[in-house]
Image (cartoon, rainbow, N blue to C red):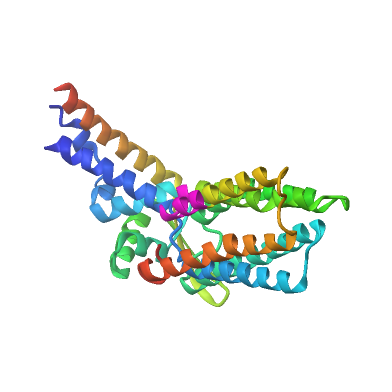
Amino acid sequence: MESSWATESLQVIRTLMERSAIYRRALAPMMLLVGGLGVAAAVIAWFAGIGSPRGFAAYWLIVSVFALAGAFLVVRRQALMEAEPVWSAPTRRVVQALLPAFFVGLVCGVLAAWPAWREPLQVWWLPPIWMVLYGCALHSAGFFMPRGIRLFGCGFIVCGCATLAVVNARSDAAGMPDLANAHWLMGAAFGGLHLAYGVYLGFTEKGKNEA
Amino acid sequence: MNPGPFLQLDRVIHEKGRLAIMSLLAASPQLSFTEMRDTLNMTDGNITAHIRTLQEAGYVSVTKEFQGSRPLTTFALTGRGRKAFTTYINLLEQIVAQTKSGK
């Protein structure tokens, strides 16, 4: 009897220790913000006619900076409202898990934007690579977040790989469409998927600050 | 079966609510009052009472500060608390091991 009680206690302790490491703030507002920004950025880029390889890479790097800043402000606001530290242990773990893939994405973007002679086809590789990297980042962070995030990350990885296959297949045959069309791809992936997930979370997240 | 490990269990930690609080704090450098309350689904009064007991035993430190204009109360395990928690876990494992080996 003592043994079964001790085993149960150890199990409860393990579960609680795991739970304390999980990031629990509401994700729906962040997803909706990032998704809305992604869609708006795609529409603006299309109408602004940003079609040069350098312009494409630089433009989306700037958009990502705004998206990250917006996400940080949402997290900060939630923490302040809930009287919790902004830079809590779960938040730190999530950021640390996101950083490597984000850094590689930044390097890819800078390398794509740097030389003026870059061909449009070369920059067509950038959206799928960013999608795969972003999916990997979410999947890593998902170990410290609700399980849905890992699935969401896998969605990005699958979409990114599928796009990579298309870009690869068309790179020596019919060629890719005008680079301006890649803005729609970015808008659909980084805008549409976030919006869809944000709406889903908005209906399913329990309470205002749980996930 | 040797009752030794069971009798040595720390009575301060042994209570269900305090064990839950110690478990959370063992996995995080610090936790705020609201994080703890939401994770454990405890009332404010319960948390306060358990924390006071743990604080009196020297197992938990309480920090009160302001984040902007809002008060922020955070808890952390002290060195003594971490040691007591580790000892408690070791004793539980001993109890399980003893039963498995049939002593």
Q: Residue at x 16, y 38 (%)?
A: A4
Q: Residue furthest right?
A: A116
Residue A150 within the segment the image draws in magenta: yes
Q: Residue at x 31, y 34 (%)?
A: B90
Q: Position of residue B38 (x, y in %)?
A: 36, 64
Q: How many marks?
A: 0
The answer to whether residue B103 of the structure is visible from this angle is: no
The answer to whether residue A130 of the structure is visible from this angle is: yes
Q: Main secondary structure of the magenta part?
A: helix
Q: Residue furthest bottom?
A: B69
Q: Check the image and report above or below for B84 versus A117.
A: above
Residue A188 appears left or right of B49: right
Q: Position of residue A10 (x, y in %)?
A: 27, 41
Q: Residue at x 64, y 61 (%)?
A: A186
Q: Position of residue A144 (x, y in %)?
A: 46, 50
Query: Could you say which is closer to the camera, residue B19 or residue A92?
Result: A92
Q: Quadrant of the C terminus of chain B?
A: top left
Residue A117 appears left or right of A160: right
Q: Which residues are magenta?
A: A142-155
Query: Could you say which is closer to the camera, residue A135 or residue B12?
Result: A135
Residue A110 appears left or right of A3: right
Query: Could you say which is closer to the camera, residue A128 or residue A4?
Result: A128
Q: Quadrant of the N terminus of chain B?
A: top left
Residue A111 appears left or right of A125: right
Q: Position of residue A149 (x, y in %)?
A: 46, 54
Q: Check the image and report above or below for B22 versus B37.
A: above
